[in-house]
Amino acid sequence: RCDWSSDVCSSDLVQWIRELAHDPGEVLLIGDTTHDFEVAQAMGVDCVLICNGHQAEARLKRSGVPVVGGRSDLFSTDR
């Protein structure tokens, strides 16, 4: 089990992404906190944040990555 707030977990994920057969450019981390964004940066992967989680939309938008309202917005073709 991973404690998502710990640096240990972040370093485990960085190691995991290095072990994958996928290019980090092909990986998208979907999260709902700025910490998820920080983990994505450490992993060297793209990130999208969902604003119906633990943090306010304004705070998430300050990260500079796309912010969507919910999971269904991830697959919207209206953009």
Image (cartoon, rainbow, N blue to C red):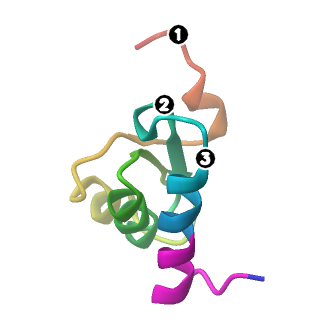
| Residue 2 visible here | yes
Q: Which residue is mark 1?
A: 77
Which one is in front in this view, the residue at disc 3 or the one at disc 2? 3
Tell me if residue 26 comes above or below residue 31 in the rendering: above
Question: Which label number is shown at residue 26?
Answer: 2
The residue at 46%/65% (across/down) is 36
Categorize mark 3 by other alpha carbons within 10 Å: few (<14), some (14-19), many (20+): few
| Residue 52 visible here | no
| Residue placed furthest toward the top | 77
Relative depth, front residue between 71 and 58: 71
- Which quadrant of the structure image shows residue 62? bottom left
Element carrying mark 1: loop
The residue at 49%/76% (across/down) is 10
Question: Which label number is shown at residue 20?
Answer: 3
Which one is in front in this view, the residue at disc 1 or the one at disc 3? 3
Element carrying mark 3: loop
Categorize mark 1 by other alpha carbons within 10 Å: few (<14), some (14-19), many (20+): few
Residue 45: % across, % down = 40, 46
What is the span of residues highlighted in magenta in the rendered image? 2-12
Tell me if residue 62 comes above or below residue 23 in the rendering: below
Question: What type is the residue that disc 2 sits on?
Answer: Glu
